[in-house]
Image (spheres, rainbow, N blue to C red):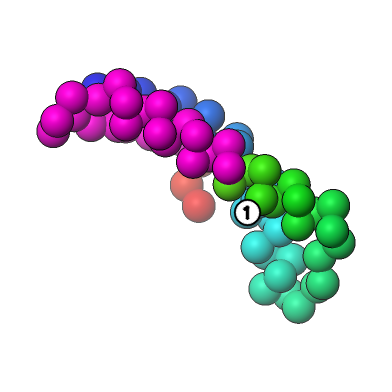
Amino acid sequence: MVLDKGCLDALLAGWDQLQVLRGWGRQLTDKEERLGEAALASARALLAEVAGCLVEGGRCVGVRIRDY
């Protein structure tokens, strides 16, 4: 089992905010787009590492401080 205590949430926090801005119809700057892409790449890399640690049928549990 892998326990994630907020790491994935932290990696995606900026990306999440960019999605909110997009939902409001705001055009993102090139820098914001690059930061969003980097956040997703980091999250994918983390999940790939988690997948490499788990045996078949293993579980990944995420812990959050608050509900969304």
- Does 14 sit left or right of 27 as displayed? left
Quadrant (top left, top right, bottom left, bottom right) of the N terminus: top left
Give the residues in magenta.
41-65
| Location of residue 26 with respect to 43 vertically, above or below | below
Residue at 80% of width from left, 73% of height from top?
Answer: 26
Instruction: State whether residue 12 appears in this view.
Output: no
Circle 1: element type: helix
Would you call the spot at circle 1 few (<14 residues within 10 Å), some (14-19), or many (20 or more)?
some
Q: Residue 60, percent across and down?
A: 30, 32
Up-down relation of residue 36 to residue 66 (above or below): below
Quadrant hosting residue 18: bottom right
Residue 60 can be seen in this image? yes
Residue 27 vs residue 34, the one in the foreground: 34
Q: Position of residue 53 (x, y in %)?
A: 30, 21
How many marks overall?
Answer: 1
Q: Is residue 61 left or right of residue 67?
A: left
Q: To which residue does mark 1 refer?
A: 16
Give x and y (percent) for residue 3: 35, 23
Q: Nearer the viewer, residue 12 or 29?
A: 29
Which residue is pictured at 67% across the width and 64% down the height?
20
Q: Amino acid at mark 1?
A: Asp
